[in-house]
Image: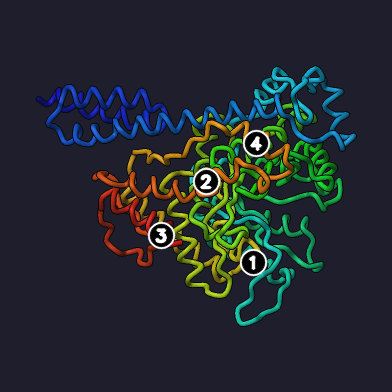
Amino acid sequence: MRQRNKKLIRLFDDATSSEKQFHFQIAKRYYQEVVALHPDSPEADIARERIRDMNALSVEKGIYQRIHANAKKILTEIGMDISASPVLMALLLEADAIDTKSENALFVPIKAEYLEACLETVPRDMAEDPGENAFGTGATPPFLLRPGRDDLAPANRTEFEKIVRTAVEYADTLGIFSIPVATDRSISVFDSSRLMEDYFPDLKMTYTRNMSDQETAYFKDRSDWMDGTSLMTSMTFMPNMVAPFIRSAKSGNNLLLLDLTIAGASGPASPEALLTQIHAQVLFMMILAQTIHPGIACVHGGIPDVLGVGGDLDYSDPGQPIINSAMARLNLWVTGFPSAQSGGSTNIVNDIPAAVEESERSRNTLRLYGVHILRHAMGAMGNLNYFSLEKFIEDCKRERNARLQWLRTRHDFVVPLHLPEDPDAVSGIREIAERGGAKNAEHTLKHVDAFARWHRVLAEAGEEKAYFPELKDVVTDIDEEVERGSAAESIKQLQETFLKS
């Protein structure tokens, strides 16, 4: 009997270990063996439910594999619209990267073999990787929110120094410290970065597009720094970013390649098609970076955004955390690229307590499904237009408490995200490109309610899960006794929040 119990425990541990490595079919076989050999055990009760989730997770992983394959197909069969940039064209022509024989491409297609060779050289490891669910600052909001004042202005040197010193007090909570807010002429971006470096020892992010060549080169071979840059949007290049992008790549800085495509506006409304276009645009930036500087470190900064009911970018929208979790899973499960996502912020401006609670709900949703490096989660508000030191402090306190609760109730199970499938993703992206935007495409109209349907599926999927710990939406007391609840209840609470939004 004792030997049987040892084997049962080993089988169950092997199953959960396989889950954590995203080998869902292997985990399924272990769970099936648990049920077959010990059908009356408590582990078998859980294993039967996990078998169903392994099927759902395998389907989900298959969608991410298709997104990766289709993103490469976008680059080789549709191409990116860079013909108006002599500099970018010259780079790729000199490297013999362009498929000049393609007859069906809309724009400039990349040779498949060149694409694969470049992606192979992208490092999959980060020397200063903060790990999964590493929440931090970012977005460089243009305005500092000052209590009791209505002035819209960036931070001055004194205010920025105070923010940096405060961040050090919560270094245990920050997975990444990005430039937290824009500054006025009293302190440059380079000086702001050096100040951050003097106080904060872990992973940091700056942007060098406005720095001198010498200042940009300062971040070369610095494993604790990322240089945030971008180039592509809506399948074409941004003219003002060509020179900064090339300079950062030539300098050898660790690149955070950012793409902030918005569903239904600058990209498709379907979640799968949205991720496919974003992924294609980030892969294209990776290819250019590797062309300029082979082996340069690239962090996948595909950050999908959603429109709110009013038609504007809305960080309070419940779709924001789940679509960013899906983008993270694409890289965690399939590509292996280091990734940075967005979430944990809010569109609220003038109500700090409400903003703090809404941000925490978003972070807890992201933690439930899992992300990698998460920017914008601490201190940002008003759809990334404002940084509030008061909110930052409360965010960090709440995050400490939430992490403690998560550690006390942590589990080894992966929660299915049930990403909706879109078999027409590639043709939809082609149609959007041909019609000059998502708003003019039939594909967009077909998927206008895609996120609402996704929310309903997630709400229904939370039923009959009796083994997940309950992660409360808002944690206020670090000494509060942590209780275990059902998965149905925990996921249902999260999704009720979605539907009320």
User: Three-letter amino acid code at disc 4?
Assistant: Ile
Question: In the drawing, what numbered circle is on residue 120?
Answer: none
Image location of residue 90, percent across then percent down: 88, 29
Count of labels in the image: 4
Disc 2 marks a residue whose amino acid type is: Ile
Q: Are marks 1 and 2 in contact (CB under 8 Å)?
A: no
Q: Which residue appears farthest toward the right when viewing the image?
A: 86
* Residue found at x 46% / y 31%: 61
Residue named by callout 1: 386
In depth, the one of 371 and 235 nearer the eye is: 235
Closest to the observer: 237 or 8?
Answer: 237
At a point 63% along the width and 66% down the height, the residue shown is 387
Front position in the image: 341 or 411? 341
CA gap between label 4 and label 1 equals 33 Å
Which residue corresponds to mark 3? Answer: 497
Give the residue number, with chain letter if any, for mark 4.
429
The amino acid on which the numbered mark 1 sits, given as a three-letter code, is: Tyr
Mark toward the start of the polypeptide (1 vs 3): 1
- Neighbours of disc 1 within 10 Å: few (<14), some (14-19), many (20+): many
Q: Residue at x 29, y 30 (%)?
A: 51
Tell me, yes or no, if residue 53 can be seen here.
Answer: yes
Q: Compare marks 1 and 2 and give the one earlier in the sequence.
A: 2
User: x%, y% of residue 68?
Assistant: 58, 29
The reply to whether the C-beta atoms of the residues labelled 4 and 1 are less than 8 Å apart is no
Pinpoint residue 4: horizontal percent, then vertical percent: 14, 23
